[in-house]
Amino acid sequence: MKRRWLFADQLGPHFLDDPEQPVLLVISRAVFRRRRYHRQKAHLVVSAMRHLAAGLGDRAELVEVERYRDAVAGRELEVCHPTSREARDLVRSLPGVTMLPPRGFVTAPADFVAWAESRNQLRMEDFYRAARTLHGVLMDGPEPAGGRWNLDADNREPPPRGADALPVPPPLMPTEDEIDVSTRADLDRWERDEGIGFVGRDGPRLFPVTHDEATRRLDHFLAHRLRDFGPYEDAMLRGDPYMAHSMLSASLNLGLLDPLDVVRRAERAYRDEGAPLSSVEGFCRQIMGWRDYVWHCYWHFGERYPRTNALAARRSLPSWFWDLDADHVSAACLGDVLAGVRDRGWVHHIPRLMVLGNLALQRGWDPAAVTEWFTRSFVDGYPWVMVPNVVGMSQYADGGRMTTKPYAAGGAYINRMSDYCRGCPYDPKHRTGDDACPYTAGYWAFLHRNRDALTGNHRMRQPLAGLDRLHDLDEVVAAEKRRRVY
């Protein structure tokens, strides 16, 4: 039986064919040298690999080297298809290494290609419906469970009025052990002696590093948090960063959980335990819909896609953003969300899209640099995740290949879906003056700057008509060009 080389995002049992299969795990310092990753992401990856090696005992060979080639060149190995082009090209260059089909996703590449080749536009909603039909998830015969494919309309509630947190148990947190202690000491040594730098703050490990830990978090989520996930999945509270989210993205992207097993278990929570269909459907949509969709789009759109820049956004990211310097920020929403990235390496999908991504889109920051920022700053960030999410969805840099319109919004959206605007020095209703909200004013400046590129989009007809009615547009645009404080 060939030894199976497992990359750091292939750490679950579903990446092996036999429970006795020998395994090779390689920790490459060059990976951490190339990017200034979040400290907690580096800890998570290294700790997860060491925990797997410890659990497998003599079956595992764990090596820590400068480059992957130092550990794998000249060896007879097999490996599941990697998740990045760079890693795939490395595997292809190694004559003794056999590359197997990819794992860790619900829909196979051949099934996605067959679906994509029959369509003019690749919309996630259409893919999701096809995937549910193909895999028989939340289906009652040929029809979707409950008679509706999409229950998003039930899942857009603002946070409860006056609440500081949702009335749900907090996510189940892991307990650090001696492997975490040694990992932290080694990362300290890398910083001190190896010239490897990190961003963000170190802290107690917040995410699972083993299949068992991830399974326990999934169990806890299904039993105690899933019911409230759906209604409030788009809501934000400054005192509740986790809300009712599953906190499983890092585990799925490390390969600790099989996503098809996760959605099957969520479906059982609906059919056997009475979990609300709207919450279960929304959760399954995130995993077998959006997660699978961005994975396939990463490969399908080709090698040039990461550099796509349809809106010609060229501005550099400011240093305070690269450094996660939340203390530089006055806006309550941006300051709290950036602090969450600094302190946890994680915020849920709405702060990512509507606070961080929305800011970058409005300000015309280079989408390739924004992609790089998300990849290095988030514990669940990998190229396959962030390229489609940032280039396609968040920054509309592909001109609409993934989404039908830009995800740009003013302060009114943030005010409706969060408690951030209470006590903020900026007023979401004001687009001029010292208290002009950077999101409200930035929204109109974005539309003005990109009017020509967006004019042909029918979904932008109404916002662009609103732009024409602004009596103070010149003042707004001039002020936002000068803005240096957020």
Image (cartoon, helix red, strand yellow):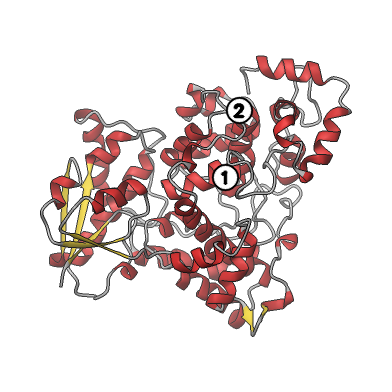
Residue farthest toward the left in the current orientation of the protein: 74
Say what secondary structure mark 2 lies in.
Answer: loop
**Which quadrant is home to the C terminus?**
top right
Q: Would you name the residue on which mark 1 appears?
A: 392
Q: Is residue 25 above or below residue 264?
A: above
Residue farthest toward the bottom in the current orientation of the protein: 141
The answer to whether residue 225 is seen in the rendering is no
Residue 165: where, in percent of width, then height? 64, 50
Image-quadrant location for residue 448: top right
Of residue 424 and residue 113, the one placed in the foreground of this image is 113
Image-quadrant location for residue 458: top right
Of residue 396 and residue 284, the one placed in the foreground of this image is 396
Residue 228: where, in percent of width, then height? 65, 63
Residue 318: where, in percent of width, then height? 51, 22
Q: Is residue 246 above or below residue 181?
A: below
Drawn side of residue 198 relative to residue 70, left or right: right
Residue neighbourhood size for the residue with mark 2, other residues' Cα within 10 Å, grouped as few (<14), some (14–19), many (≥20)? many
**Earlier-in-chain disc, 1 versus 2:** 2
Q: Which residue shows up at 27% across the image and 42% down it?
A: 184
Q: Would you name the residue on which mark 2 appears?
A: 364
Specify the amino acid type for callout 2. Answer: Gly
Between the residue at mark 1 and the residue at mark 2, the CA separation in whole angstroms equals: 15 Å
Of residue 462 and residue 201, the one placed in the foreground of this image is 462
Specify the amino acid type for callout 1. Answer: Gly
Of residue 229 and residue 444, the one placed in the foreground of this image is 444
Image-quadrant location for residue 309: top right
